[in-house]
Image: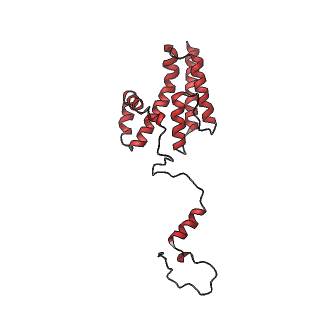
Amino acid sequence: FRRVLFRSTPHRAGDARLDPWRLSLTTRNAQLSANREPRPAMSSDGVASPRRDPAVDAYLPEARAVINRVARSFSLAARLLPSRTRDDINLLYLALRGLDDLIDIEVRAGGISSESAEARIAVIEAWCRSGDQGAAGGGRELQIFADLSRRYATFPRDAVADFLAGRSEEHTSELQSH
């Protein structure tokens, strides 16, 4: 049994055209979707794939702790967001904070060489310019960015590149002043 919608005016006999109002709902929907580009299944919040990479998921406890410790007012505001979105914001903050601290803290404390930090940042900058989904060589920050980019079609790689450019300018001016 197929449910059929009828137009209020009768269909003219002998009309060769198919009356769209007489199509079954299933057939009409199939014709409409045949004309659309296929796209990944998305949830209401624009996430293409709800499953986070398990390696990135392992960073969540640290991400929550960092945002609660370093950005308390932002952490409070983020509580208004749905939990999955909030967790992604926490991970993004962890990655950006990690890049910010890479030069400011890790290099100065001797935990990583300046060359190693610059190489890691260069890998992330190259990733920002490319369309690659890979995350090799950029540390946990690139792992997080790549996972977010895979799941959010509108992930702003250009904003990450701008952030890195700003950090580079800030670092250069700090070195020149000393």
Question: Observer-nearest residue: 150 or 108?
Answer: 150
| Quadrant location, the C terminus | top right
Residue 41, placed above or below residue 7:
above
Judging from the image, the colouring scheme is secondary structure
31 and 171: which is toward the camera: 31
- What residue is shown at x 42% (from left), y 33% (from top)? 60
Q: Quadrant of residue 61?
A: top left
- The extreme top residue here reads 178
What residue is rendered at 59% in x and 36% in y? 134
Q: Residue furthest front?
A: 1
Pinpoint residue 31: horizontal percent, then vertical percent. Answer: 58, 67
Residue 146 spot, x, y in % from top left: 55, 37
Q: How many marks?
A: 0
Q: Position of residue 67 (x, y in %)?
A: 40, 31
The quadrant holding residue 160 is top right
- x, y (%) of residue 5? 49, 77
Q: Residue at x 55, y 23 (%)?
A: 170
Tell me: 84 left or right of 119: left
Instruction: Judge whether 26 appears above or below 66 on screen.
Output: below
